[in-house]
Amino acid sequence: MPRTAFADLDHVTEYLYALPRGGKSVGLARATALFRALDNPQDQVRTIHIAGTAGKGSISAFLSSILTAHGLRVGAHMSPHVRSILERFQINGQPISDAAFVEAVTSIAPSVARLGRSTMGTPTFFEVANAIAFHHFSSMSVDYSVIETGIGGLRDATNTISRTDKLAVIGRIGLDHTDLLGDTVAQVAHHKAGILPVGGHGIFLRPHQSSVHTALLDAARTRRCTFTEVGNHDAVTTVTPEGTVLHLDGADYPLGLPGHHQGNNAMLALRAAEHLSARDGWDLVPDAVHRGLSSASLPGRFQRHVVRGREVILDGAHNHIKFAALVDTFRAVHPEQRATWVLAMKGDKDPQGAIAAITPVAEHVVVTRIPEADTDPLAAWQLAEVARTAGLPVTSVDDPREALDIALEMSHGPVVVSGSFLLLSAIEDGIDALVRG
């Protein structure tokens, strides 16, 4: 079959965004068929597979940074992106180049088209994004690939990795995507535990809920998967305006990502690195661990800017666990202060939970709308009603950039932008314009 000719990055991006976005049904059959047509690149590299309701991106960033600091070549498939789709496909912290991205999609497109003509239908954006990551990391001969699940784990397109040496890492588990994963945390845990490799090894954060713990242990037993439990209280994390430090095993590790919750994420990453070094025969060097943890970075996780003399914090929190962590970090960094919040959310999220979390640290809320490109935005007026019911002063503006401008004008303290990574993408462009102006 002739290869599709893509002129440039814009052409490739247009092609990808025209793919189906997925829906309420998930499964492995189509992803398996796509990857098989590409000679199963997902099984050609040693992989760390990461799941969890919150913390996947941070665990990936910490682990990738630790491994990179040890001189290893590390691919990381991160999602979502904030500024550029290239952010999703990284090697040693650097996004894929335009040329390599075009080449990867050009190689994959014929198989995508062939499946589209079959009864399986056209692969989704997420399935093709995984194919790009697997293809790129395999072709670049990375030492390890770090792969985040999309939704759940058991029936997620990333769960096509069949290598028994795959290391599974599971972070904090809570309710999210209940239409797909179930209405209880135990049901959600069952899906997350689906990434545990048969006959392999897993590392997970010991959950508070006994039902979640049982679900993880049952899955490990069924899959004959050995495991390491990391306790929530095995480490102490201090957060001050000057930074975040993890105190673990008698050592102090400054963290590149701020917040008490990042202590557990960093600890999971460190335990994963310890397992890999022991299994694969390379030395874990304390100085390299320090460098890796302190240099880890991730867009949209308490990301701080200064605009017009005011601090603007960008954070992609979009569920109750992430909003609670964001508020906790804000209180530690800005004690006794309140923020003006710029919020927009998708229609399937929990606006009541978000507003309840931010109310103690909000002086005003500017509600806006995710840009039109999104398929399921929550209307600004709907979010405004929730905020007013909570007793918060509210301004409603449809345009995200205008919302940021208004927040900067009225705020007496920091401005926090949150609720969706799609909102952050629009706001970051607005910040650039404001700085230039």
Image (tube, grey):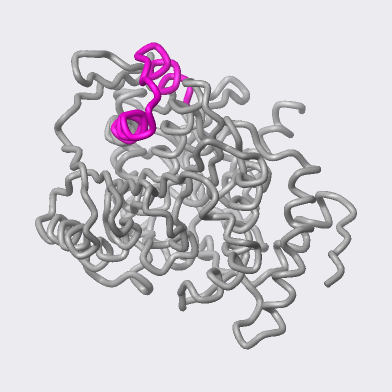
Task: Name the side, left or right, on which 292 lies relative to 4.
Answer: left
Depth order, front residue of 138/366: 138
Task: Name the side, left or right, on which 327 lies relative to 236.
Answer: right
Task: Name the side, left or right, on which 426 lies relative to 247.
Answer: right
- Residue appearing at x 67%, y 48% in the figure: 85
Image: 172 above or below 122 = above
Residue at the extreme left of the image, as rendered: 210
- Residue appearing at x 44%, y 16% in the figure: 291
Depth order, front residue of 231/281: 281
Depth order, front residue of 164/151: 164
Q: Is residue 285 magenta?
A: yes
Looking at the rendering, in which quadrant would you find the N terminus? bottom right
Residue at the extreme bottom of the image, as rendered: 119
Depth order, front residue of 115/372: 115
Find residue 186 and report its horizontal and vertical position in percent: 20, 64
Q: Is residue 233 magenta?
A: no
Image: 313 above or below 179 = above
Q: How many marks?
A: 0
Find residue 138 and report its horizontal and vertical position in percent: 61, 47
Residue 364 falls in which quadrant of the image?
Answer: top left
Task: Name the side, left or right, on which 437 lies relative to 343.
Answer: right
- Residue appearing at x 9%, y 56% in the figure: 210
Magenta span main SS: helix
- Residue appearing at x 64%, y 81% in the figure: 121
Find residue 372 and report its horizontal and vertical position in percent: 66, 63
Q: Is residue 413 visible?
A: no
Looking at the rendering, in which quadrant would you find the C terminus? top right
Q: Which residues are magenta?
A: 271-296
Find residue 328 and report its horizontal and vertical position in percent: 29, 34
Residue 293 falls in which quadrant of the image?
Answer: top left
Q: Is residue 237 visible?
A: yes
